Each structure stands twice: as C-alpha cells, then as structure tokens.
Image: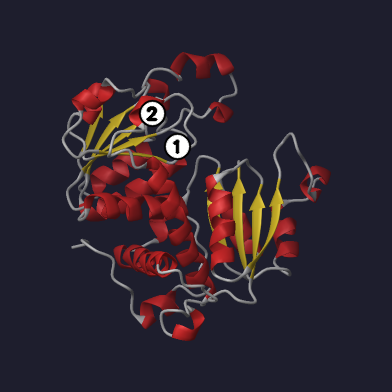
Amino acid sequence: MLTDFTFPSEEMIASFVGKNILGAPQFSKEELEAVLGVAAFYEKALKEGKRLWDMDGKVMAALFFEPSTRTRLSFETAMHRLGGRVITLAESPENQISSTSKGETVHDTIKMVDNYADVIVIRSPRTGDAEIAANAASHPVVNAGDGFGQHPSQALLDMYTIVKEKGNPEGLTVAMIGDLKYGRTVHSLVDFLKYYKCRLVMASPDELKMPESIVQKMLDNGVEVKFCATIDEAVAEADIIYMTRVQKERFADLAEYDAVKDMFLMNGETLQHFKPGAVIMHALPRVNEISLDVDDYPGAAYFRQAGNGLFVRMALLALTTGNVRGAFKPEWAL
C-alpha cells in the first residue's frame, strides 16, 4: 500500500540505468514507486538546503520542437539542481532555428545530438518522435510529450502529487474533465491509476472523448469507468478532479475548437458540488477552464503540482544515467 515514499533498493536503481522513458505503460508498479521514492529524496535534500552534485560533469540536451514552459524549465532546473549542464534547442513552427527547417529528420538530429549529451529530453508535436529518437540514440531519451501520445514525466509527477495531497491512492475516484482525446497527460496517468484500482469518471465534449482503446484497456484491467454529461455531475463524487485544457493547436478547423472550448468550465459555483477534501489538478497552462476565483480553494493543487515536476524530473535524469549518488555518498549532497 503506497501511503508514503520509500527509497528504492540499489538493485532497483541499477535497473533504470540506460533506460529510455517513453511512456507510462512501460512502468511496473514497483518502478513507478521507485521513481517517486527517489523524487522524495531529492525534494527533502533541497528543502534541507543541500547542494547536489549527482550529475556533475554530465550534459542534458533539451530538444523542444513544441512550445513549453513548465516541462522545459523544470527539466532544465532539475539538471542544474543536480550539478549538471544543459544545452537547449527550442523552436516552434513560427520560429525555425534548427536544421529541421532544412529537412533534417528527427533521426539525424538525434544522431548528431547524441555526440554532445549524456541524456536527451525531447518534446515534439508529432506522436512517435520520442520513439524515433530513442532508436537513434545511444544515451537515454526522455519523452517530454509527443503529439497526443504520451507524457510520462507528467504522469509521474501527477502520481507524486496525488500521494502528497491525498495519501494512499488506493480506490480513489478520479474525474478527468475536458479534452480527453488529445490530452496526453490523462492518456499517461490512467496507466498508473490502474495499479491502485482507482475509479475513473470522465466528462468531455463528444468530440473529445477518451479514445476507446484506452477506455477498453482500463476496463480490461478491472478499472471502473463512468461517463458524465456535466462537470457538476463529474466532480460530485471525485477525490481528485483533473482538469484539462481544450488544445487549440490540435484542431485543423478553428470553428470546431470554438464549438467545444467553453463546454466544461470550473468556477466558484462548481466548488459547491465538491466532495469534502477534493483536490483539483491541472497540467497547465490553463486558458479559461478554471476561473481565477478557484485558486483560493485549499484543494487547488495545480501550482503545487507544477512544483513537484522538479523533483520527479531530477529523479528521472539521475536514474536513467546511473547517477543517483547523494543517497549513498553523503559528500555528493552537501
């Protein structure tokens, strides 16, 4: 029963060395809890004011072919907090600064960057690019979000947040609201929630429902799934309310976006339907799906959730490169 974070064994830590982190489905329950345990160690070390050197002499390449604030900054900060260095390539379709604008493939870009770094973090608007990168690299690759596919580090920090906010996640009811079709955060999170037999409540426009393949996978794993027509109905029984942004960038026709973007909004009145102690999560950025008057609600955890990304991403970088040192050598955490 996961009620607190336990630091993993040396054998479990060693099993992560050289691994690519591509999606939540690759994690066993034990591996999930191992990452959370290392994240908790790093959070405690930072709160105690320790300076960590676990990644001293190492370089992380951050390749962001899609705009990002929290994911990019937390990965870069994670590397700096561990004493390593960062090289960054960040661009968008409107701001082409790499050789991809000349037709270079992701495979070739990664083959080149692999010469410069000890670990590669990649975000792309194209589903599957992280796997292409992993196949091209000799160093570990961490998927920081690929299209509407997977976002494993977000799912890990989401689980870390759930345990910090609610304790034992076993049997919790989790409401997922908004864009469940393109929302890679919820696509990833459900694979972890199934380990704790969490009950899923889903509320979304018909056009943005959770893909049937994911729903069926949850049902096959004994997870109860319920669909709701309104946000008030969905939040009424939820311990965790996971709001998602309707992603304008995924729509080819903006008229279709405009038709659904305001269908599931949370405001101060929505709070009246909450179960006592309910926690609100959101991967951010928000647009209008959570109004500002909700921020003062004690269970509004989305900014705390964003902060937890630092510790989880520190854990992933150190684990995949075999550099979890401070826990075993005190001189590495002074």
- Residue that carries the numbered disc 1 in the rendered image: 183
Q: Is residue 328 visible?
A: yes
Q: Amino acid at mark 1?
A: Gly
Q: Is residue 70 above or below residue 195?
A: above
Residue 65's disc is none
Q: In what quadrant of the picture does the N terminus appear?
A: bottom left
Residue hosting label 2: 178
* Residue for point 37% across, 82% down: 11
Is residue 290 at all visible to an observer of this figure?
no
Mark closest to the chain's N terminus, 1 or 2: 2
Taking depth in this image into account, of 105 and 278 the one nearest to the observer is 278
Q: Which quarter of the picture shows residue 111?
A: bottom right
The number of discs equals 2
x, y percent for residue 214: 35, 41
Question: What is the three-letter code of the residue carrying label 2?
Answer: Gly
- Residue 148 is situated, as x and y percent measured from the top left of the image, at 51, 40
Left or right: residue 83 versus residue 87 is left
Q: Is residue 13 above or below residue 227?
A: below
Q: Marks 1 and 2: CB-CB under 8 Å?
A: yes
Give the CA separation, mark 1 to mark 2.
Answer: 9 Å
* Residue ranking furthest to the front: 49
